[in-house]
């Protein structure tokens, strides 16, 4: 009870300070939302604009009620340390009463885990550019809304909050996203694989080196020109979407297209988001352990399926949380998809039994499906059965801690603090 009261008081203070800081320094704001790929898109946009603009981005996935004001104040999450929270409050106060070299641009990830979250965010900021990624039929956090439509309506409020003189950047492959053009008088740019997209990706391919996947390549079609784009260290369609959104923002800001592509080529996706890692026994890991939703899990599995290998396709799939009444059906769908092509499935968590059911329904042999309650035990089992050339996708919701499975099978576990998600001491101390 005391902790909740303390958290509420601190949140109100930090929010008030953030509001005053925005009013004082008046930075331009790029806001990113959607149900899939917010963080990777935010980081790709920042990679494009960072060298040219004086900018700051949300750290990691700071998109909660406290994460947004902390980003505005350039403060860290103090977790349960009251002295660190006092330090954050004093830092915010210093920004208000003194003059500092505050960033000209903020690149902010805006999440909506509960009804009212977008309204709360737009009480702090008025975006100059809003980027929408993609909505899933069953988006993450839907458990806390009446329906997927309510999730969509909540996030659509960000388009309404956009300055009329601003820019709306939309995923052309999602009709619900395209419909947001009607929510604002601002101009819009579109990106995607759709032939009508202004910034279009074609010829998407996995790039190999010595027979192992090392990244993704595609052709950018824009304004009558075709440009090759190489993205090392990531796989799947989501990094392509993130790159396209960042290119659209960069072009609007009149940055050179060739320079933008060059920055993306040296850009590394955040940990836990379709990153390619070296595994033990000359295997390859696709680490997509940050979080999971049905649409993201499907995309990750399709990326796994697209990879050519002399080894096996292995999917290590944890629970997808916060799906409410959709839990059973969506886990079965993912299991069926994996069961159609995977050589081995390892399911982790209480809800993962429905992944097992789906895989069996797809005709997969029971002997090739293993289930665990604990992600670390799943990793230890996998450590014993991996063979040279295997490609291993690891994915699950944040609460299942699937990065622990990755740590058991990565070739360089000493680099876990750099390469994996949730490596802070506060996270590692959690059961």
Image (spheres, grey):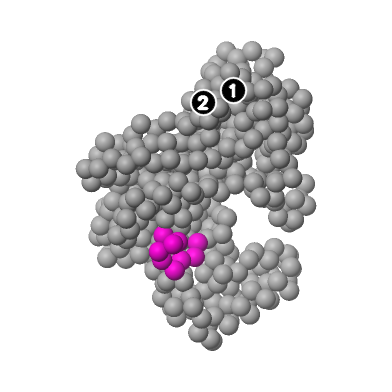
Q: Residue at x 73, y 74 (%)?
A: 83
50 inside magenta stretch: yes
> Residue tagged by mark 1?
313
Query: Which dot marks residue 75?
Result: none
Count of marks placed on residues? 2
**Alpha-carbon span between mark 1 and mark 2:** 9 Å
Number of residues whose C-alpha sits closer than 10 Å to that of mark 1, classed few (under 14), some (14–19) or many (20 or more): many
* Outermost residue toward the front in this view: 210
Residue 63 in the image: above or below residue 370 = below
Task: Give the side of residue 374 with respect to residue 324, left or right.
Answer: right
Q: Where, quadrant-wise, is the N terminus in this rendering? A: bottom right
The residue sitting at 48% across, 46% down in the picture is: 37
Q: Decide which of 170, 144 is in the foreground and name it.
A: 170
Disc 2 secondary structure class:
loop
Q: Nearer the viewer, mark 1 or mark 2?
A: 2
Residue 396: image quadrant is: top right
- Left or right side of 60 for 1: right
The residue sitting at 55% across, 16% down in the picture is: 362
Disc 2: CA contacts within 10 A as few (<14), some (14-19) or many (>=20): some
Position of residue 391 relative to residue 7, above or below, is: above
Residues marked 1 and 2 touching at CB (< 8 Å): yes
Farthest left residue? 224
Q: Look at the image and give the residue range highlighted in magenta.
A: 49-57
- Front-most of 293 and 172? 172
Res. 72 in view = yes
Relative image position of residue 176 (x, y in whole percent):
34, 43
Please state the horizontal and vertical placement of residue 174, each as a whole percent of the image. 35, 40
Residue, disc 2: 307
Residue 124 horizontal/vertical position (percent)? 46, 69
Q: Secondary structure at mark 1?
A: strand
């Amino acid at each position: 009870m005391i902790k909740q009261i303390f958290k509420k008081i601190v949140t109100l203070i930090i929010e008030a300070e953030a509001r005053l800081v925005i009013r004082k320094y008046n930075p331009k704001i790029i806001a990113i939302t959607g149900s899939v790929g917010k963080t990777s898109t935010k980081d790709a946009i920042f990679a494009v604009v960072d060298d040219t603009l004086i900018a700051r981005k949300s750290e990691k996935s700071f998109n909660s009620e406290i994460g947004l004001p902390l980003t505005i104040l350039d403060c860290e999450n103090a977790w349960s340390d009251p002295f660190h929270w006092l330090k954050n409050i004093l830092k915010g106060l210093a920004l208000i009463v003194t003059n500092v070299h505050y960033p000209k641009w903020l690149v902010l990830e805006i999440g909506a885990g509960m009804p009212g979250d977008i309204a709360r965010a737009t009480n702090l900021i008025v975006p100059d550019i809003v980027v929408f990624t993609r909505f899933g039929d069953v988006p993450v956090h839907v458990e806390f809304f009446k329906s997927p439509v309510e999730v969509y309506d909540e996030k659509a409020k960000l388009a309404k909050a956009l300055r009329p003189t601003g820019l709306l950047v939309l995923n052309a492959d999602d009709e619900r996203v395209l419909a947001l053009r009607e929510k604002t008088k601002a101009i819009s740019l579109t990106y995607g694989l759709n032939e009508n997209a202004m910034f279009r990706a074609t010829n998407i391919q996995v790039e190999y080196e010595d027979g192992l996947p090392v990244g993704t390549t595609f052709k950018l079609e824009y304004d009558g020109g075709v440009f090759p784009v190489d993205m090392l260290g990531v796989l799947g369609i989501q990094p392509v979407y993130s790159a396209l959104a960042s290119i659209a923002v960069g072009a609007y800001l009149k940055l050179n297209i060739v320079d933008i592509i060059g920055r993306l080529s040296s850009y590394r996706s955040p940990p836990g988001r379709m990153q390619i890692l070296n595994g033990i026994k000359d295997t390859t890991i696709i680490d997509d352990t940050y979080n999971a939703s049905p649409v993201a899990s499907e995309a990750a599995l399709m990326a796994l399926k697209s990879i050519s290998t002399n080894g096996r396709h292995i999917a290590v799939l944890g629970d997808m949380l916060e799906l409410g009444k959709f839990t059973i059906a969506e886990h079965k769908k993912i299991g069926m998809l994996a069961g159609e092509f995977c050589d081995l499935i390892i399911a982790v968590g209480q809800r993962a039994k429905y992944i097992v059911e789906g895989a069996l329904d797809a005709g997969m042999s029971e002997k090739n499906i293993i289930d665990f309650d604990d992600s670390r035990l799943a990793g230890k089992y996998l450590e014993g059965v991996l063979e040279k050339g295997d490609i291993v996708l690891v994915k699950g919701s944040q609460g299942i801690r699937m990065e622990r499975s990755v740590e058991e099978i990565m070739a360089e576990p000493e680099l876990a603090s750099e390469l994996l998600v949730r490596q802070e001491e506060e996270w590692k101390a959690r059961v």
